[in-house]
Image (tube, rainbow, N blue to C red):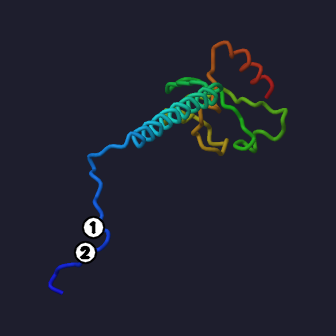
Amino acid sequence: MYGNNPWTPLDLVPISNPTKFSWEVEKGAREIQELHAKVREKIEKSTEQAKSCTSKKRREANFQPGDLVWIHMRKERFLSKRKSKLMPRLDRPFEIREKIGPNAYKVDLPSDYGVSATFNVADLSPYHDEDEEILSLWSNSN
């Protein structure tokens, strides 16, 4: 009534001193920290293993503007150019116009193809001077 709260049974119980230390609690905390370290190591190991497996077939290709490349003619992208499985899968060498990103390049593609001129590295193969005879065979077959 006058601003004093009455005593409750909890107020009468002595509060343990926070400076007292339990060795069992420290042991449990140490075990949890060791478990976390083991789990972290396993996660890092499995991440490295997955990274090595996924990048096993990945190839590094760095083209510069002006380089000649073969274009892989995917059925999904070139519907009019790949009507049967006997048609060529690579098309004549095209010149790289610009590098858009680490995996994307813009190619000097004629407008009659009707597709975007931006290609992923997976769809491009470097053109070498030894490929000249393949190019002559290709031009003779048309």
Residues at circles 2 and 1 in contact by the CB criterion of under 8 Å: yes
**Residue 18 visible, this orientation:** yes
Identify the residue shown where x is 30% and y is 54%: 16
**Residue 109 point in image, percent of width and height:** 60, 36
Q: Is residue 31 shown above or below 62?
A: below
Q: Is residue 83 shown above or below 16?
A: above
- Please state which amino acid type lies under the numbered disc 1: Leu
Distance from disc 2 to disc 1, alpha carbons, whole Å, reads 7 Å
Which of the pair 57/116 is nearer the observer? Answer: 57
**Secondary structure at numbered mark 1:** helix
Residue 7: mark in rendering: 2
| Number of numbered discs overlaid on the protein picture | 2
**Residue 68 point in image, percent of width and height:** 59, 24
**Residue 133 point in image, percent of width and height:** 73, 15
State which quarter of the image contains the C terminus. top right
State which quarter of the image contains the N terminus. bottom left
Residue 124 sits in quarter: top right
Identify the residue shown where x is 60% and y is 28%: 49
- Please state which amino acid type lies under the numbered disc 2: Trp
Identify the residue shown where x is 62% and y is 22%: 126
Residue that extends furthest to the left in the rendered view of this protein: 2
Residue 12: mark in rendering: 1
Mark found first going from the N terminus, 2 or 1: 2
**Residue 64 point in image, percent of width and height:** 50, 25
Identify the residue shown where x is 28% and y is 58%: 15
